Image: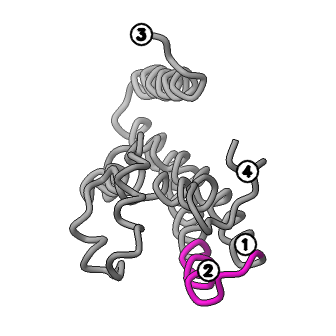
Amino acid sequence: MQFSLVMRRRLALRTLGVLGTALIVPACRSPSRRAAVLEALVRERVAPGAERLVLETRGLHVAILEVAERSDAAALERARAALRRALPAWKRSSAFRAGPFADSNVFVRAMFWPVRPSAIDRVLDGRRIVDEGVIERLGAHEKGLYALEYVLFGRLGAGAPFSEQERR
């Protein structure tokens, strides 16, 4: 099976994270030293990453609401820019799969990949109003950040607000 560049990058980043943790934590011989290292990791990496994730996700939420209200090219571009900022914040935070992130399954729900474009297109076919209830019942492959990426950057079809260049 041939891995895509994205999959190879994900594997490399996960491997580096595991190796980094494996090298740091055992080097801490005393329990107090180990606790200090872990506390610093949370204070200096996990907490700022979580704050950034919340900030960027709130910005994305506001931008998506604007697209829903205005449906113009400027609002769409602001939503795309917000997603470009939010996705890296989510990816960085996904390196820490313990604590509240893991307990809530937030990464599984928000970052399911690959999405199923045909399933997303069926949801957005215009035959029903898409509200919170509809979204709640959708499967992971029909919602989340990567589904949003598909809608904002690549959803094809009549009336889609994307140029031919963006469709490629």
Q: Is residue 23 above or below residue 45?
A: above
Q: Under tag 3, what secondary structure? A: loop
Residue 91, position as x, y percentages in the image = 53, 46
> Residue at 60% of width from left, 23% of height from top?
5
Estimate the spatial distance between the alpha carbons at disc 1 and disc 4, rounded to whole Å: 16 Å
Residue 126 covered by magenta stretch:
no
**Residue 78, disc:** 1
Residue count near mark 3 (Cα–Cα under 10 Å), binned few <14, some 14–19, many ≥20: few
**Residue 166, disc:** 4
Estimate the spatial distance between the alpha carbons at disc 2 and disc 4, rounded to whole Å: 18 Å
Q: Nearer the viewer, mark 1 or mark 4?
A: 4
**Outermost residue, bottom side:** 69
Residue 69 covered by magenta stretch:
yes
Quick check: 155 left or right of 116?
right
Q: Under tag 2, what secondary structure? A: helix
Q: Nearer the viewer, mark 3 or mark 4?
A: 4
Quick check: 105 left or right of 50?
left
> Residue at 54% of width from left, 76% of height from top?
61
Q: Amino acid at mark 1?
A: Arg
Residue count near mark 2 (Cα–Cα under 10 Å), binned few <14, some 14–19, many ≥20: some
Estimate the spatial distance between the alpha carbons at disc 2 and disc 3, rounded to whole Å: 39 Å
Mark 2 lies on residue: 67
Closer to us: 80 or 107: 80
Estimate the spatial distance between the alpha carbons at disc 1 and disc 3, rounded to whole Å: 37 Å
Q: Under tag 4, what secondary structure? A: helix
- Whether residues under marks 2 and 1 lie with C-beta atoms below 8 angstroms apart, the answer is yes
Mark 1 or mark 4, earlier in chain: 1
- The part of the chain drawn in magenta is 59-73
